[in-house]
Amino acid sequence: MGDIGFVLQKTRYGDSVGRSIAISSKKNVSARKSTGLPFEHALEFPAFLATSADLSVVLEGSLVIYAIVRLLTYQAKRRKVKTSSRLQFHRLGPDLSPRLHSSPPVLHGSTNAPPDPVHDRLPRCSWQQKELLLLVLYAVIFYAIVIRRSLRLSHDHDAKLYGLRPGWIGSLPNDASDAQWRNFRGNLLTLTMVFVIFTLVAKVLRSSFSLKAKGMSVVWTLISLAYLSYLHGACIMFIIAIASANFFLVKIFGRTKYFSLVLWIFNLSFLVCNRIYEGYKFSSFGQHWAFLDYFRGTFRWHICFNFVVLRMISFGYDYHWTDENTRFDRKKHVQNCDHCSSGKTCYLILQEKRVTSDKFSFPIYLCYLVYAPLYIAGPIISFNAFASQLDSPQSIYSTQDVAWYGIRWGFSLLLMELMTHLFHYNAFAISRLWKQLTPMDIFIIGYGVNGIVAPENMPRCVNNCHNLESFWKNWHASFNRWLVRYVYIPLGGSRTKLLNVWAVFTFVAVWHDLEWYYLLLRLLTWQKWLPSFVTAEMLVKSAATAFPVKGAFWEFVFRELRAVAGAITITCLMVANLVGFVIGPSGINWLVSGFLQKEGLPTLSALLVSFYVGTKLMFHISDAKQIRRQGRTR
């Protein structure tokens, strides 16, 4: 649920549509229940709950029916297109490295147009349409059951849940147990004002004063430091001191063979020390500094500093790589990229673009670290991508695109409010009431805790990924790019990927901004489970690639096996997240034994069937999106 707290804003750097999690409280302690719905009065609103359930089912059903119409429309269009290529299917999932999968544009009227595998990928028989209808019908029933059961759970246990507060939808309590979401709602007005000010200042400076990189960086730095002074108070001195030390280390060791070792030791040391010493006390440096401990701002600085560490490492490596030959094939990429082929510049071009040495100055470096719209929670962009856009505003997204994102963000905000009033998933997770629930209820809570996330930094909903690599590419996508560029590739990339994945997930577990003392064991357990699943998935993919299927029958079998594998993967992923963030390592045996008992086996079977159906629906949705993308290039 914490992944929902993102503000959509129009920026001029990086992915252009940034998000920032709002300000957290000084102490990251979940709020106790503020009773807005006494248990003894619970029977006064069963009719309202029933109405809410019906409304939720109608909303889900409407969206699914809309999807059916769109999919059937695409299938009808496909039948009018004559192609000659064989039926092709997706691999089990995308590579770990970010890559743009798009076909080159086809000239109108060309007689030598290449075959269109996307159109051939859709089913050719009418029974596939009937299958789609059955899948959607099952999905509607599944969501109806989950929604009604979630409402019942929230109704029956609300008196025992922590973090519930009076809501504004009828008399329903609002689940404010997640610190990030709670503080996002509370500081929405402040964040909106900050982003409006940045947008206005950018327009005035560019239109009236024609400021370039150095001038813009100075202005952004001053405004951002003022914002950080409000957030962190006197603790801003810690940020500037550590950032300055990192800058000089990069300049001194940036051209040496020991650079990577020095950079990682320095940044990981501060990442750990910041947590151990809780952001340090000024009194530790002498009693004459003790008075500054009373001016620590509204937000703990070392929480945000996790993102600053990523930016400091990015600056260091981009500086280190300035004299090296890049393997990036720009011409090939432009031919295969929708953005670049239309005359725009995509993020990958910005990331791989070489910037001049004068861009690696301290003012631009400090501006990159503290740039306010991206400071709290990203998205994370490389230094090259940031510095290359200081001279000119972004051109990836039009005003219409940004307006559409704003509408989607507003809808997501309202949907999130509806969900937190009706379904108290996160409150169940922190209240440790899961031992009183059935295995079915446990997985419903796990399904809800994953949440529904904003676009771009989260290109897909978390629950719309049927394999682990796809999940990691779409959960904090900018963080995934950072991991690939600065951790995965320097360690050897795909040549040693089975080993590299363990290093990547270990860093993610250590970096993650959760309280270390009582969650470290959970995070490390989660770090062990997920790499194991990813390694197994990679081995299966390698085997599938080594022995390609031939013939319509085996292609059909392969598609079904992929759906089964997707169901198993989703189950494993949910178990790993439940262990890492809800029940802990001690609850593994309890959870597994509950499903393997006589009462739990039907639930486990039903879940696997449901996830199989969901995976098949993901295949259809993916095919429809690729047809639409292909149609735009014709």
Image (tube, rainbow, N blue to C red):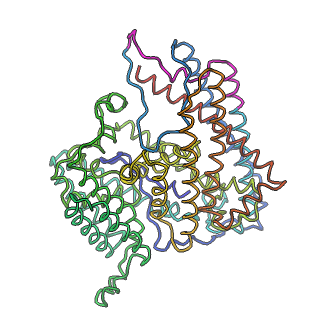
Is residue 411 magenta-colored? no
Image check: 414 left or right of 376?
Answer: right
> Percent x, y for residue 443?
69, 53
Residue 409 visible, this orientation: no
> Percent x, y for residue 489?
37, 49
Q: Which residues are magenta?
A: 108-134
Image check: 509 left or right of 433?
Answer: left
* Residue at 51% from the left image edge and 17% from the top image edge: 85
Residue 145 visible, this orientation: yes
Front position in the image: 578 or 197:
578
Front position in the image: 246 or 425:
246
Is residue 114 magenta-colored? yes
Image check: 626 left or right of 67?
Answer: left
Q: Quadrant of the N terminus?
A: bottom right
Q: In the rendered picture of this protein, how many numbered marks are placed on residues?
A: 0
Above or below, 90 against 577 in this view is above
> Percent x, y for residue 100?
41, 35
* Residue at 37% from the left image edge and 66% from the top image edge: 305
Front position in the image: 209 or 375:
375
